[in-house]
Image: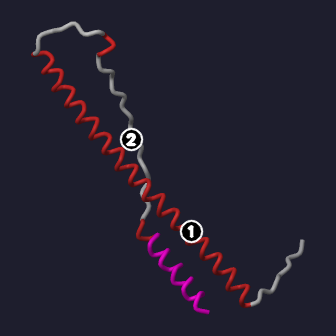
């Protein structure tokens, strides 16, 4: 199998390089958004754990108050249901400074190509 080479004119090469840089820019911004999403999701899970602990504390207080009150017969349909817990997942952290520098480098290349 033989290789064939195609000669590109300067405007074609600039156009191809711009498209390649725009693609790299989109990939890096997407990964930046993904990192941000992961950190927000991790924070959400931590807040859920804290909320669960606060609810457990409130339930313990309610149980102690309930023990001190006189007993009444309550239908089973009005009793509170149990709380289901969820376990947080560990997420890998990626260095966002490295992504920022890469984004800045690509933007600089794009601006230099735009001025041609």
For the residue pair 72 and 1, the one nearer the viewer reads as 72
Helix, strand or loop for disc 1: helix
| Quadrant hosting residue 82 | top left
Which segment did they paint magenta? 99-116
| Outermost residue to the bottom | 116
> What residue is rendered at 80% in x and 86% in y?
7
For the residue pair 112 and 76, the one nearer the viewer reads as 76
> What residue is rendered at 11% in x and 15% in y?
69
> What residue is rendered at 36% in x and 47% in y?
44
Is 5 magenta? The answer is no
Q: Nearer the viewer, mark 1 or mark 2?
A: 1
| Quadrant hosting residue 72 | top left
For the residue pair 72 and 16, the one nearer the viewer reads as 72
- Indicate left or right for 79 with 13 as reference: left
Residue bearing the label numbered 1: 26
Q: Are marks 1 and 2 in contact (CB under 8 Å)?
A: no
Upstream in the sequence, badge 1 or badge 2?
A: 1
| Outermost residue to the left | 68
- Indicate left or right for 60 with 35 as reference: left
Q: Badge 2 local density, few (<14 within 10 Å), some, or many (20+)?
A: some
Is 109 magenta? The answer is yes
Q: Position of residue 6 (x, y in %)?
A: 82, 83
Quarter occupied by the N terminus = bottom right
78 versus 35 height, above or below? above
Q: Position of residue 25 (x, y in %)?
A: 55, 72
Residue bearing the label numbered 2: 88
17 versus 30 height, above or below? below
In the rendered structure, find residue 104 and report the number of the disc placed on it: none
Q: Position of residue 35 (x, y in %)?
A: 45, 59
> What is the CA distance from the residue labelled 1 to the residue labelled 2?
30 Å
Q: Main secondary structure of the magenta part?
A: helix
């Amino acid at each position: 199998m033989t290789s064939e080479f195609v000669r590109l004119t300067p405007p074609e090469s600039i156009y191809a390089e711009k498209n390649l840089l725009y693609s790299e820019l989109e990939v890096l911004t997407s990964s930046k958004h993904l990192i941000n999403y992961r950190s927000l999701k991790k924070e959400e899970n931590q807040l859920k754990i804290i909320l669960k602990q606060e609810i457990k504390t409130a339930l313990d207080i309610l149980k102690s108050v309930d023990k001190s009150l006189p007993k009444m017969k309550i239908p089973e349909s009005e009793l509170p249901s149990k709380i289901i817990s969820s376990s947080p997942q560990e997420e890998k952290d990626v260095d966002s400074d490295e992504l920022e520098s890469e984004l800045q480098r690509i933007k600089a290349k794009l601006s230099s190509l735009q001025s041609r």
